[in-house]
Image: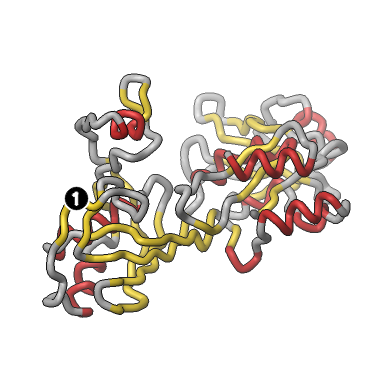
Amino acid sequence: MDVVRRIKRASRQKRVGHGGTLDPFATGVIPVCMGQATRMMEYLIEGGKEYRGVVELGVETDTYDSTGEAVASADTSGITQDQVTATLAGFDGTIEQVPPMYSALKRQGQRLYTLARAGIEVEREPRKVEVFRAVLEDWMPPLATIYVSCSRGLYMRSLAHDLGQKLGCGGHLKSLVRLRSGPFKIEESVTLDEAERAFASASWGQLLHPPDAVLSDLRAVVVNRKIEERVRQGQALPVGLRMAPSQPEEPARVYSAEGRFLAVIAFNAASGQWQPTKVFDIRHIDSALVRA
């Protein structure tokens, strides 16, 4: 939200949102949505993530990261690079992960971190998350630099803690960089200072992506002017739209014959038709996605 506030202040846009939080000690990619593009946040949040983190083995903290208090320590002299590599590979695939107490998840209306700061620890249900790839990039005992590609919902702090547990020495996340969020990569990103300067100089349009930039993994259909009008009015599309769904409620993107992005549609199995779910006024799209 600090990022959103700074972008909102610099851009003077009323509708600004972010596509996924970062812990205060972390750095990296935070997609920022503006104007009509804020309606794309759900697709950004669902997108995959890539991280590079440094795990310090031998020291556990109450927050699972470097901002917390040390609660346990152990000797790591017997830990080898091969052990770290093999243990980390065990996280590949679908895993069950227990969220840390110091997280924004809610329990009976209260944030877990609020309870944790009050010295209260509650039971947390493990959640299924997907790790597409987890590898050791560098080993300088007791520091292990790891790269992780994953689905939404994975806590790198918990992964660092669990890695330490499996190695029998404990550990915490010393630093973290988000390398990618959805389609946006860190090497294509700008800093907050650069974004603010761009807004001040009126060159900020060069930083923006069109709203459909986050939908590249969805199938696309081009419609004629008659169907375009139905899309604009949010009406179900006729059976004559020949695009067989590959799955129930499949979303897809719609473009005009001139190539303008019109809407997101989803297949309604009950009616056997495609129904617009998000319609965009292409004449008044004044915003897109800023990478900060």
Q: Quadrant of the N terminus?
A: top right
Q: What residue type is labelled 1?
A: Val
Q: In this view, does 98 lie above or below 15?
A: below
- Measuring from the top left, give residue 285's x and y in whole percent: 81, 40
- The residue at which mark 1 appears reads as 71
Q: In which quarter of the image is the C terminus?
A: bottom right
Q: Which of 241 and 118 is in front in this view?
A: 118
Q: Nearer the viewer, residue 6 or 135?
A: 6
Q: Nearer the viewer, residue 213 or 230?
A: 213
Q: In this view, does 267 lie to the left or right of 12?
A: left
- Measuring from the top left, give residue 123's x and y in whole percent: 20, 32
- Measuring from the top left, give residue 188's x and y in whole percent: 65, 65
The reply to whether residue 284 is in sight is yes
Q: Is residue 132 left or right of residue 35?
A: left
State the residue lying farthest toward the front. Answer: 69
Residue positioned 30% across, 79% down in the render? 140
Q: In this view, does 87 lie above or below 255?
A: below
The reply to whether residue 227 is in sight is no
Residue positioned 54% across, 59% down in the render? 28
Question: Secondary structure under badge 1?
Answer: strand
